Image (cartoon, rainbow, N blue to C red):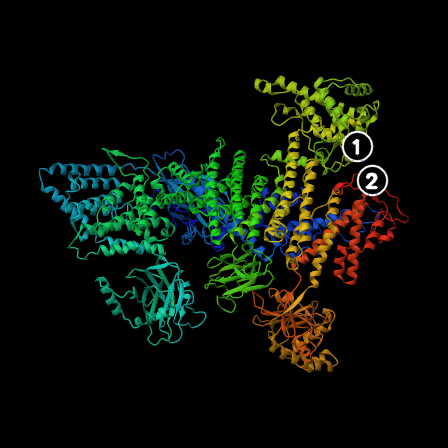
Amino acid sequence: MGNTTSGEISEPDPLSFQNLVQPDDSRTAGDNPLDLSVLFNSDALLKALVNIKDVPGTAIQKNAEVITKWLKAKLDKDETTVNLAQFVDFVTGKEVPKEEAMELFADVDCEEEGVVDINYLLSVLQDSGVSDPLNALQPCHILPGPVDVYSDEKSAGTDVWKKLIRFLQNRRVQSSRLTLPAQSHTVSMFHNREKLVNGRYGMYLEKEKDVELVMEGVDDEEMEQTVISHCYSKITVSSNEKNISGLTDGRGDTYWQSNGAPRKHWIRIHTIPGVIVKELSVAVDTSDDSYMPKEMTVLVGNSEAGLRELRTVIVPRELTGKLVLVRNLRKDYRYVQINIRSCHSDGCDTRVRGIFVKGCKFSKEPEPSVLDTMTTWYLSLIAATAKAAMPVAPGLRDTILAQSKQALGSLSPLVLSPTSSVKPEFLSTFVIKEMDRFLTQLCLPGDNFVSVDRDSLQVMLAFALAHGNVNSILTCLQILLDNLSLELPVSTISKLDEIQRDKEYRHAESIKLTLVLCDGGEKDDTHKADNVLTNELSPSGNPYVSATGKTVVNFLLKQSEDLFIKAIRVTVKVQSGSQGAKMGLVFCTDSSKDKTPEALLKEYDHYNGWTPDDYNKLKKERAQGKQVDPSAPIGYFEPEKESGEVTVTMDGIKPGSYILIKFLGTVGADAERMGVHCIRVYGYSLSQEDIDRAAFVDRLNTLAQVTSDKNTSISGVMVLLRVLGFVTLLLQDLTSLQCSRRSVSLDPAMLGEAHLASDHLSLEKIWSLYIPLTIYSSDELQFCSVLCLHLLRASLPFIRPSREKKTIEGDTLTTPTTVLVHLCGLLDSESTDPVVRKLTQDIVVEGVVVFFPDARTRREYLLSMINTVLDGKQSNSWWLKFEALCVYFSQSDGHTLLELPKTISKDKELNTDTTMSIFTTMIQVAQKEALVLIGGGTSRPDNLVKLLSALQSSLFFWCRQHITTGEEGIRKKAAHLLEQYVSKLSSSCADILEALGALSQKTDSLLRAIAKTIIGSVLPQMTVLVGCMATLPIDRLNLLGSLKCLVKPLQELASQLPTHFLDVGSPAPGSVVTEEAVVGMWTRESTHNYENNAHVTEEFVSPAAVKFVVEFDPRCHTERRYDYLEFTDSLGKKTTFDDTYGSERWAKTATFAGPKVQFYFHSDSSTNEWGYKFTLKAYGKTIPPLYWLNDLQLTLAQLLGKLCSVTLSTKSLRIPTTDKKEEKAVETLLHSDLWRTLFRGGYQLEDKDNKFTRTISGVYTTSSDSNLSTLLHDLANGVENPKVASLLDICQAEKKRQTYGGQLVDRAVNAVFAAFICHTQELREELIQFACDKGQLTATTKLMSGYVASEALRRDLVEARQKLMEAKEKEEDPAKKANIDEDAPVKACLKKAQYLLKFAGLSKAQQEDKISSPLVRPTWATKGKNWQKVSAAVNTVGKLKQQLHGSDKNLTEKYPSFELVLNFVKNDAISEEQVDFLLQQRAQFARCTDFVYSYASDYLRAIGTPAVFELTGLIFLQYLLSEQRHFPLHYASKMDGCGLELENGVRRSYHNLLATILDGIAVYSKPQTSDRQTLVSTYLLHLLDCQWQDYDFTLISDLQLPEFLIHSAVKSCSSEQGTTLEKGERLETFEHEDEMMQLYVLQMAYLEKWKAEASPEAALEAIGDTKESRLFFVCKMAASSPQPETSGITCAGCSTSDTHEWYHDLDCSERLDLCKTCFFGNGDNRPGTYSTEHRFQAIDRQFGTCAGCGLVIISHRFKSQTRKDHSLCLGCFRKEEAQGHAGDSWLVYSITEQPEKGQTNKYFTTDPACCVAFAYKDGFKQTVESRSDLSVYNTRHAWTLFSSICLFVATHVNNSQTGAPSRSTGLLLAQCIQLLGYMLKAALVGRLEDAEKSTREPPKDEKKADIVATEGASPTSAGGAHDGKIVEATPSAGGAHDGKIVEATPSAGGAHD
C-alpha cells in the first residue's frame, strides 16, 4: 500500500526521572483533580472552568434537529402522539444507539404507556422544556369545540380534565427557569460548581488510566517503570506532510488531512526503543462529514515491510472526541501504524484531529554489548599494565596525567553526557565507567583524598564535568573540600557560565505581554499600537503607524502585576519602506507604584539621541566588569533592510516589571511617521518567590568573581563555589524542563541538548559534602553549605529512595532519617538564618518521598501524627512534617492512605472498615479543633482540613467510579461507605454548628477562623460532591436522614446573624442585586483559513445572564457580504459581522440581551479568509459574595431538594437487570392483563374485622370472608378439612369423572380450582354461605364450571409428566438423567396456583374487563432444565379453550378470570419471583415517596415560614421539582400493590406538604414580597399538576384547592391593574427626527395636491416623479386600499400584489417595490435596476396608519394609551403636541436600521422583533412597572388547574358507574360552580378586586342559598348548576366519609344527574 515516507515529525527521547511522572498533554502540571478549594471562590471557580472540557453531547442531542423536524412533520399531519416503536425505528436510522433512544423515551413516558405526546417530546428535545414563563401555557384548544359536561352522553367530557392535566405537565416551565434574580445567580453558581466537580472527576479517571498502564509479569524489583506521554520519536504519514503538526499540537480545531488515493491513507508511529504502547487513541469530529474515518486498522511490527494487522475499529458516526484504538500491548514494537480503510459517506480523503500515544518504559540495568565488552577489556588491560609499570617507571604516572590533562582540557562540560549529540557512539555507559575507574586509580592511589595533587584533581574534575555525572562531580568536590589549599587553572571552570547562558537562551519562551503605554500616537483606528502584540511575524495584519511627526516611539510593556519579566531575546519586525524603524534600544526596568507610565518614560528621554557607538561603549564597559547605570539599555538592534526583522539577545539579563522598547528614527530621513509590525519578547515569567530564590545566584556571582585570563589560577574555594553553583542551576533547569515537557518538545533546538546525568543520584553524596561545610566559618564556605541545600532541593526529583540502613566496617551511612533530623533541628533553632529556614522548609515539604521512602511508612507516620495533633504544643518542624505529609497525600496518593484498592477483582473481598476508621479519626480531630476555636483556644486546622478535603474528593470519586462501573457487590459496599462517611461528617458538623449557635458573642474574627475548619471547607465540598452523585443508585433516604441534623442549627444561626444571610427582597445595602459580573465565558475559533461551505451553529445559555458581550480577535476577517457571523439574542435581534475587524461592518465588541445567545457562521463556496476568534462573556446581576454560612445553608437546601426530587423520579422503577430476556419478561408482565387484574392490588391484608381489603390504587375492591379464605387455602394445600372433602365429593358426583394421575396431580388440579373460586366473584358467592356454616352446598352450574375448567388441566399435566419420564429413560448420561424431574410441570402448576391465593379476589366488574394484551405462552419447561425439550407435550391455553368450548360454548367469555389464572399457571415466562419483585419495588417506591413528602414538609417547618420565602426555601422548592419531568402523573402512581398502610401514608404526607406551603402563603403576606409569594405559589401549582383520583376529593376539599387556585389567578391578574409609569429621561428629539420632519413637510404638500385631483393617476402626475413622491405614493396607496390586491402596488420581482408588506427602494432612479419574498430571497427575481448598495424602506399597513394624515407610518409610531386605535406618525404627533393635545400617555415604536447581510441590502424595518418600544409622556421617557412574567404564568396555570378540578369533580358526579356521589363531592362541585359564578360576574362588571374579595368571603345569603341547593333544593336556587342525585354521608374524622350512601329524590324538572 505504498509505505514510502512522505513526511515526518520528530519528538525527543524521554529523559530519565525517578520520582516524577510526565503530565498529560490535556492538563497543566499544576492541576490536581482532588483539589476542590476553588468551589466557593467565584472568581477562581470561573477561571478553573476555562480548563474544564465540556462533556460531549449524546447522539440524541447531536441529531436533535433532524428528530425535531420529523416530529413537527407528524404534527402537521394532525398526529399528536408517537409510540416507542416509531420513535426507536426513526432514531436508530440516524445512527443513534437503540439503548440511548429507548432511555430517552422511557424518561418522557412516565406512565410506561408506550405512547408520548409529540409536543412534550419536542419540549424535551429543545432545551428540556419551555424556558420563558411568559410564552408558556399559551391558550390552546384541547378539543375541537365546547363540551357540555352535564349532557346525557356520559362520555362527552370524561377525558377533558385529563387532557388539561397532560397539557400542564407537557407545557409547564421547568423549575430551573422559575427564579428570582438573586436566586438565578445562585443557581448558576451551583451549576458551575457541579460542572467543575464533574470535570475534575473526568481528570481523576484519566489519571487512574495512567496509573493502570502497567505491564503484566514485570518484577518491580528488577525493572523500573516510567509512564511516558510522548513515547515516539517521530510520526510519518502517507501524504500531505505539511499538515502533520495537526496530529500532535493538542488542539481540536486543527487536523491532518490526507491527499491521495482513497483507502490508502495511513499514519505510522515510530516508537522509542524499549517503550511498550499502553494506549493508542485518535481524535475525530463528526462535523468532518465525509472526511471522518469510519474503519481504522491498527498494525504493529519491527520493520516497515513486516507489519501485521492487530485490530480493526469502526468509528461511530456521532463521535466527537478521543477514540481508543488499542490498549496494553505486551511487547515493544518499533512501528505502530493506523490504516484508514474507509470514511463515512464514502469520502475519499480523511481527517484525523490528533494522535495520542501513552506507554511505559521499563528500564533495567542494561547489559553490555559486544563493543562495550571489547572496549572495556582493552581499557582494563591498559590500566592494569600502567598500574603495574608505575612502581618501575615513576614518570609514567606524570606522563599519563599530562596527556589526560591536555586531552580533557579541550572538552567542554557535558559533551560526554548520555544526552549529548556530539558524544561518540562507542563511548557507552560501560566504557565511561571503565575510564572513570582508571582515572580514579591513577589520580587517587590508595584512595587517599588528602594527598591528591593539583593535576590529578584537575583531571578528575574535568572528566566528571565532561560526562556530566552528578555523583562523580560531587566526589571531586568532596576531594576538593579536603584540599582547599590547592589552586586550579581558570580554564577548569571557564566554560561553565557559557553553558548556563546557552541553556537559558534555548529555554526562553514567548512571553504574553500587554501594552501599558505608547507615546507615538496613532495614524488611525486600524493602525493601533496594540497591533504590534497581536500581529504575527508574517506580513499579514495591519502594522502600527505613528502620528505625524513622531519618529521616536516608546513601547512600555508588562505582564500581570504580580509577575516579573526576565528577557533573554527580543524579535522585532518593522514596516518595510521608509517608515520602518531604523534602530532601537531595549530596557528592563522597575517602577514604584506611585510613578505613572508617562513619568517613567520621561526618565529615559536622554537616550533618544543615542547612536550605535554609544551602545558599543556601554557594552565594552560591561565586559570589563565596570559599574554601569542600572537604567542603561540591555539590548540594541538594527532591523534588516529587506525583511525588516531582527532578533537581538540581551547583554544584561536582569528581571524587571517593565520592558521598554525605544525605536529611534526611521529608515527614510524624510519620513514623517514610523511603522512597527510586530514585537516578540522571549524569556521567563518570574513570581516574587522566584526572585527571592534566585538571589543566591547574585550572591554566587559576587563571591566567585574570577578573571577571564585563562593562564592564571584560582583558589579551591572559588572552584568549589562555581562548580557547586553550576550543578545546582543545571539540576534546577532539568526539573523545570520536566515540568514543562510539552513546551520543550516544540522547540527543535532542544533535540541535541546535553543534560546532567542524574541517574542513581545519591543522597549520601550530597550530605557528605554538606556536613563538613557547616563547620567552616568563612563566608564563601558558609555559602557553599547553603548551595548544598539548594542542590539537595533540586536533586529531590532524581534521588532514588533508600529503604534501609547499610553498615560498612562499623560506619553507618547517611540515611534519609538522619538528614530529616538535621533539617528539623535547623527549623526549630531560633538562630537559623531566614533564608536557610525557608530553604529547609521547601526541602522538607518537597522531599516526602525521599525522607519517607516506603508508602506504608508515610501512611503510618501521618496517622500517628493525626492522633497526637492536639496533644500539647508541637514544634515547628513537627508541624512542617505534618504539612508535608498532608500535602503529599492531598495531591498524589490518597488511595494509599485510605487503603482503597484502585482496581477490584471479582473474587476479591472489599473491606472498607479501615477506610472509615481513618475518616472517623480525622473527622473527630478536625471537630475538636473547631470546638477549641469556639471555646476561645487556638488551633492550626489548615493542613488537616486540606488533607481531609482531598481525601474526601478521593473517596467520592472512588465511590462514584465503582458505583457506576463496578460489580453489584462492589457497588453496594461503595455506596454504603459513602453513606457512612456522610453520616459521620454531618453529625460532627452539626455538633460544631450547635456549639457555635450557643455562643453568646460571635465576633467576625472567630467566624473567619471557623470558616477555615471542617464546617467551612470540608462540609460545603461534601454537599456539592453528593449532589453530583444524586442520580446514582445510592440510598438517598439514608443520606437525607443523615443531613437533616444540619438544618436546624443553620437556621438558628441565620436568625442570630441576619446581616450575614442574604435577603432576596430586602432593600438594605449590601443585599441588593446590582453589580454585574462574569457568570460564564466561552472562547470559539474557526480554522485559519476557514473552510468553504461552512455552517456552524451553537447556542450559549447562562440562566443568570442579563447580557452577553462578545470580544473579537483583531485578526478576524471574512469575505464581505458572503461569509459572515450572526448572533441572535434572547429578544430575537440579529447582529451580523463580516469583512474585517474594526470596520463599519465588524465592531470590535458587541452586546446582546441574555439569558441566551445563538451563534451562526456561514461561508459560501469560494474565497475564504483568516476567519474568526471571539470570547463571549455572560454578565449577570450578581449579589455580593455570599457569607460562608449562608452559602452552606443554600448549598444544603439545594442538595436536599435534589435528593428528594431524584427519589420521587420513576427512574428508580426501571428493572435493574442485564439479562435482556428477563427484562423483557418483566416488562411484559407489567403491561399485561395479569398485572392489571390479579397482581396490582397487592397481597391481601387481614383487618380487625377479619375482612380482606385491597390497596386504594387498585381499581376494584372486595370483601371476602376469612372463613372462605381458610377453605380455599385448605383446598389448595391438601389440608384435611371436612368442608373441602364435601366440596370435592359434590363436584365429583355431579361430573361423574374418574380421577387419574396420582395425588400430586390431584393437589395441582384442586389448587387451580381454588384459584378459580378465589378470583371469580360468582363462585365466591356460591361458597361463602357454605364456608360460614350458614347454608348447604349444591353443585350449581357456576361451581361446576370452575371444577370442569380445573379438571381440564389434568390431562395436560399427566401427558407432560409422561413425556418427561420417557425422556429420562432415553437419557444415557447419568448426571443429566438425575437432573430430570418428571414431576416438575405438576409442581410448578401447584406452586403458582397456591401463590394466587395470596391476592385478593377479583370482582365481577374486573373479571369482565376486556383482556387487551394476551401473553406469549411458552411451554412448561423452565429455563435451564433438561426437560425443556419436551415442549410439544404441553397444551396451550388455546387448546384448553377448545376443551372448554366443547362443554360450554360461552364458558371462557362468561368467566374471564379463568383465562387469567390459566395464563399464569401455564406460562413459564412469568414467575412468582417476578411478581414479588415488582410488588416489592412498588412498595419501596411508596416508602420513598412517603418519606420524601414528609421530609419536605418537615424541612419547610424546620426553617420556618419566613425562610420558605427567602432563598433557602425557594431553592429547596426549586430543586424539589428539578426532576418533575420524571415524576409519576399522580402522586400515588407507580405504587400498585404497595399496601393500604403505605398508600395512606403517601396521601397523608402529600397532604401535609401541600398544607404546609398553603399555610405559609396564607400567613406570609407582605406587599413588598409579592414576587416571592408568586414564586412559591408557582412551585405549589407544579406540585398540584396530577391526574386526580376518586379518593382525592377529601384532599381537594380539606385544602380548599379551588378557592386557592381562583385566588392565585385573581391575584396574578390584579397585578396588571397596578401597572405604573415612572418618569425617566427627557427626550428632546427622536432618532432621525430632522430627516423625517423634512420628509413629513413634503408629504403634507403632496397630500394637498392629492386631495385636489380627481384620481390617483392625475395626482401622481401633478406631484411629479421624485424619490420622495414615489415613497408618498406607496404609503398613500397602501393605507387607502382595504385589500392588498387593490392597492395598485406590484412587486417588481414576481408581479404579485397580494401582500401587506412592501420594501421600497429609497435610492433607485425609478420606482422599485419588492415583496418580502423577493427582497429576502436569493435575487433570482430581482429586476435589473436593483442594486446591492441601495437602501430599502419597509412599508407595512399592519404596522399602523396615522390617524392624522392617513398615511402608512414608516418612522416612529405613537400609539395612544387612552384613545382606542389611535396612532400618529412623528409629524402629526409633533403637530398635536404643539397644539397642546398630546398630553396622553403614548407607547412609541421606533423603527431600526438593519445592516446588509449576504444577499440582503440595508433596510429600515417595522418588524416588532427589531423595533424599540418605550412609554412616553410630556416629553419624558417612562419606566414601565408592569405585570411580571411569573404572574402571567401563574394566571394561566391556576386557571387551567381550576378548570381540570372542576371538570374532574363534575365528571365524577355525572358518572353513574361510580354510584351516587357523596355529599362532600356535591358540595365540592357546588363550591367550584359558585366560584365560577362570582368570577364571571366580576368579569362582566370589570371588577377583579370584587372577584378576589368574593373568593375569600362570599355573601352570607348567597352562601346559604348554595348550601340549600346542594342539599336537594330546586336547581334554580343555585343558578341551575346541578340537580338530580344528591348524596349525603356522615363525615368521619378528618373529612372522610364512611361509605353510607343515601339517595335523595330528584326534584321536579331535574335535567341532569
Q: Is residue 462 above or below residue 1570?
A: above
In which quadrant of the rendered image does the N terminus lie? Answer: top left
Decide which of tag 1 and tag 2 comes sooner along the chain: 1
Tag 2 secondary structure: loop
Furthest-front residue in this view = 1000
Residue in view at x 71 percent, y 67 percent = 1698
Q: Disc 1 vs disc 2: which is toward the camera?
A: 2
Q: Which quadrant of the figure has residue 1574?
A: bottom right
Where is residue 589? Give x, y as percent: 33, 64
Under mark 1, the amino acid is Glu
Residue 1860: percent from the left, percent from the top? 83, 42
Q: Which residue is mark 2?
A: 1941
Crowding near the residue tagged with mark 2, few <14, some 14–19, many ≥20 C-alpha atoms within 10 Å: some
On the picture, is 852 further left or further right than 1105?
A: left
Name of the residue lying farthest toward the right: 1948
Inter-mark Cα distance, 1 to 2: 33 Å
Residue in the foreground of this view, choosing between 1656 and 931: 931
769 left or right of 1897 in image: left
> Is residue 1729 in sight in this rendering?
no
Instruction: State whether residue 1444 appears in this view.
Output: yes
In this view of the protein, which residue sits in the foreground, 1208 or 432?
1208
Q: Nearer the viewer, residue 247 or 915?
A: 915
Q: Nearer the viewer, residue 210 or 231?
A: 210
User: Which residue is drawn at the image coordinates 71% and 58% (left, top)?
Assistant: 1611
Q: Residue 1898 has which mark?
A: none
Query: Residue 1375, relative to residue 1854: is it above or below?
Result: above
**Horizontal side of residue 182 vs 703, given as left or right:** right
Specify the amino acid type for callout 2: Ile
Q: Could you tell me residue 1075's position as x and y percent?
A: 53, 61
10 Å crowding of disc 1: few (<14), some (14-19), many (20+) = some
Q: Which residue is mark 1?
A: 1453
Secondary structure state at the residue bearing disc 1: helix
